[in-house]
Amino acid sequence: MANLVKFEVSDKLIADQLALVEKAKGKGKIKIGVNEVTKAVERGVAKIVFLAEDTSPVEIVMHIPILCKEKNVPCSVVKTKKDLGEKVGIAVSTAAVAIIDEGDAKNELQELVKKLTALAK
């Protein structure tokens, strides 16, 4: 499958991303699922978006990185839908997650955005 973003994401960075999602779920606010994430980005409330690389068919999420670029929202990938689902605390997998309010993970979010911005260049 073609990579959804134009850079490679290391396993360490993926672990950091999943930890941020889990932390934001606890104290902040997240949107789960392709439709909810799309709406959050369009409305300008998403701070960062994560997509699962194993989404099939990939056309389900292909519009999200483009939309994120237009709205200047950082977008990255994790390996599996199962990982995303577990970290947001749902019993099923999910292809997309957006962090709306990072809660007390402000520093982690800023560091992650810096790393992703550097990778995207």
Image (cartoon, grey):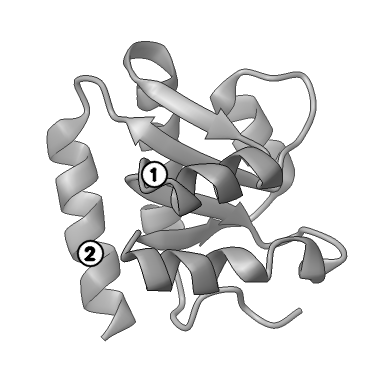
Lateral position of residue 55 relative to residue 13, left or right = right
Q: Quadrant of the C terminus?
A: bottom left
Q: Residue furthest right?
A: 57
In percent of the image, x 77 and y 58: which residue is there? 55
> Label 1: which residue?
46
Circle 1 residues within 10 Å: few <14, some 14–19, many ≥20: many
Residue 117 in picture, x, y percent from top left: 24, 71
- Residue flagged by tag 1: what amino acid is it? Ala
Circle 2 residues within 10 Å: few <14, some 14–19, many ≥20: few
Element assignment for label 1: loop
Q: Is residue 49 above or below residue 100?
A: below
Residue 45 in picture, x, y percent from top left: 36, 41
> Label 2: which residue?
115
Query: Is the C-beta separation of discs 1 and 2 under 8 Å?
Result: no
Element assignment for label 2: helix
In percent of the image, x 62 and y 47: which residue is there? 96
Lateral position of residue 108 relative to residue 53, left or right = left
Between the C-alphas of marks 1 and 2, the distance is 18 Å
Q: Residue furthest front?
A: 43
Q: Quadrant of the N terminus?
A: bottom right
Q: Is residue 40 above or below residue 53?
A: above
Residue 24 in picture, x, y percent from top left: 36, 25
Residue 108 in picture, x, y percent from top left: 20, 39
